[in-house]
Image: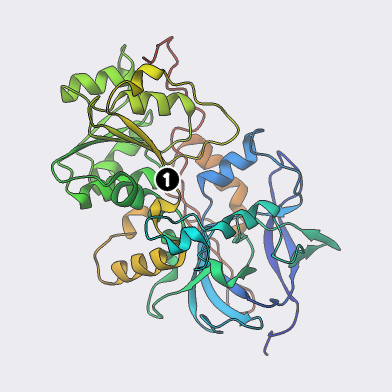
């Protein structure tokens, strides 16, 4: 029976208040309005961003209740008036970073931060309303996507059509994690052949950075993490060596200088820890080193010695790995189908949707590396949610000893 134009009832993971946990609830998902798309989610991920939102008071807001989730893939159930790039039945990638194709960033080949990205800050659709309700109350959207619902509604510009043969349970990783890390090396840092790289943080995004460095031709890729259990996977995807800062008396930047002689050519902070950003920058070669911040850092000030910039070092930010949302996701899925990139290595664990809070706890302990979730709608078959881990060095301080970063 067709659901087009009708309200759909399905399950979603809702956070009702700041600091709360996920609650599995039945929600109502309204039909899409003009330029909107309603999607049956097939695969999604519990990313480090959600982990930070759940625990970090600097990131908490007053938009509750809310359906989180910003990394996923699914099948178009129906489209609103004026939608021309996708149709019912298409496989699509959900994008927290839209691509409107009209703003100055979209029209600039070197930019990717579409102006419509800020729409996500309202936690509502473009008309200022929500498409979700639960127990008679409106529920806020998240990250232009809200993938922790069996059905969701997104703007057309936050959705891109992909190959009908693409396995959604694999390619959904280009929605955020893989693209962010891989592109951070390829597009933002522009890693060069024969270079030396250091990657701070070995969650799913950090592993993707390593893969990008390897693809770019780096000859030495040093993986840095306080959890040695992650070293095997890091080497599997391309790290040439792994080190734990807690094994040394010296600050990690001094260790890296000792290992390399004059610092690394490229460093990547993939944790979102201000102290680690300073250490990563200080690890760079003083004449030409490039440090890229990939980990989410919001609501805090960086404390970096100005002396580090009396040199040729540079510090760069990166969003979605520098890819334009729709174009980048489509390209990466095509590359996966052509066996140019390997997403399979990033998928490690599975859990049901009902176990999402258990997934949160496992991520806190660092017991798994890659975030991976699948759930099927009750309308189209059995429901299942698959989660993996991704939080790098959760709760760990890189400077447990009184080190000074110069």
Percent from the top left, x then y, of residue 130? 75, 64
Q: In this rendering, is residue 39 above or below 201?
A: below
- Residue at the far bottom in the pictured view: 1
Q: Nearer the viewer, residue 375 or 63?
A: 63
Side of 337 relative to 163 (left or right): left
Percent from the top left, x then y, of residue 233? 30, 44
Percent from the top left, x then y, of residue 112? 44, 56
Q: In this rendering, is residue 141 above or below 239?
A: below
- Residue at the far top in the pictured view: 402
Q: Nearer the viewer, residue 115 or 40?
A: 115
Quarter-of-image position of residue 207 = top left
Side of 174 relative to 63 (left or right): left
* Quadrant the C terminus occupies: top left
Quarter-of-image position of residue 277 = top left
- Residue at the far right in the pictured view: 136
Percent from the top left, x then y, of residue 394? 49, 33
Q: In this rendering, is residue 389 above or below 3?
A: above
Q: How is the image coloured?
A: rainbow
Query: Which residue is at a point 86% across and 63% down the rendered structure image?
Result: 136
Within 10 Å of disc 1 (Cα), the crowding (few <14, some 14-19, many 20+) is: many
Task: Note whether residue 144 is visible.
Answer: yes
Q: In this rendering, is residue 217 above or below 352?
A: above
Quarter-of-image position of residue 141 = bottom right
Helix, strand or loop status at disc 1: loop
What is the number of callouts on the image?
A: 1
Task: Note whether residue 151 is visible.
Answer: no
The residue that mark 1 highlights is 318
Query: Which residue is at a point 48% across and 77% down the rendered structure image?
Result: 91
């Amino acid at each position: 029976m067709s659901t087009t134009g009708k309200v759909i009832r399905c399950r979603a993971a809702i956070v009702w208040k700041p600091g709360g946990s996920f609650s599995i609830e039945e929600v109502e998902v309204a039909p899409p309005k003009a330029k909107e798309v309603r999607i049956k989610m097939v695969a999604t991920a519990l990313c480090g961003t959600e982990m930070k939102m759940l625990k970090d008071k600097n990131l908490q807001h007053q938009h509750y209740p809310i359906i989180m989730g910003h990394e996923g893939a699914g099948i178009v159930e129906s489209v609103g008036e004026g939608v021309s790039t996708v149709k019912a039945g298409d496989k699509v990638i959900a994008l927290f970073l839209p691509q409107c194709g009209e703003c100055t960033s979209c029209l600039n080949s070197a930019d990717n931060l579409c102006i419509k990205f800020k729409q996500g800050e309202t936690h509502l659709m473009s008309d200022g309303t929500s498409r979700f309700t639960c127990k008679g109350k409106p529920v806020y959207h998240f990250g232009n996507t809200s993938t922790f619902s069996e059905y969701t509604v997104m703007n057309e510009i936050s959705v891109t059509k992909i190959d009908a043969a693409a396995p959604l349970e694999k390619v959904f990783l280009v929605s955020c994690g893989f693209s962010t890390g891989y592109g951070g090396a390829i597009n933002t840092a522009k890693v060069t052949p024969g270079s030396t790289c250091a990657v701070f943080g070995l969650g799913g995004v950090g592993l993707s950075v390593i893969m990008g460095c390897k693809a770019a031709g780096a000859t030495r890729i040093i993986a840095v993490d306080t959890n040695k259990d992650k070293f095997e996977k890091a080497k599997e995807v391309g790290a040439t060596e792994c080190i734990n800062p807690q094994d040394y008396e010296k600050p990690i930047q001094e260790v890296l200088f000792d290992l390399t002689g004059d610092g690394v050519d490229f460093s990547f902070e993939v944790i979102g820890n201000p102290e680690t950003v300073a250490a990563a920058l200080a690890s760079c070669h003083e004449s030409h080193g490039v440090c890229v911040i990939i980990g989410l850092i919001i609501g805090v000030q960086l404390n970096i010695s100005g002396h580090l910039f009396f040199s040729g070092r540079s510090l760069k930010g990166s969003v979605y790995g520098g890819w334009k949302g729709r174009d980048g996701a489509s390209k990466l899925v095509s590359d996966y189908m052509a066996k140019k990139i390997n997403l399979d290595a990033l998928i490690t664990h599975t859990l049901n949707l009902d176990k999402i809070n258990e997934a949160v706890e496992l991520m806190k302990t660092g017991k798994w590396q890659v975030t991976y979730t699948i759930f099927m709608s009750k309308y189209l078959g059995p429901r299942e949610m698959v989660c993996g881990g991704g939080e790098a060095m959760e709760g760990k301080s890189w400077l447990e000893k009184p080190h000074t970063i110069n």
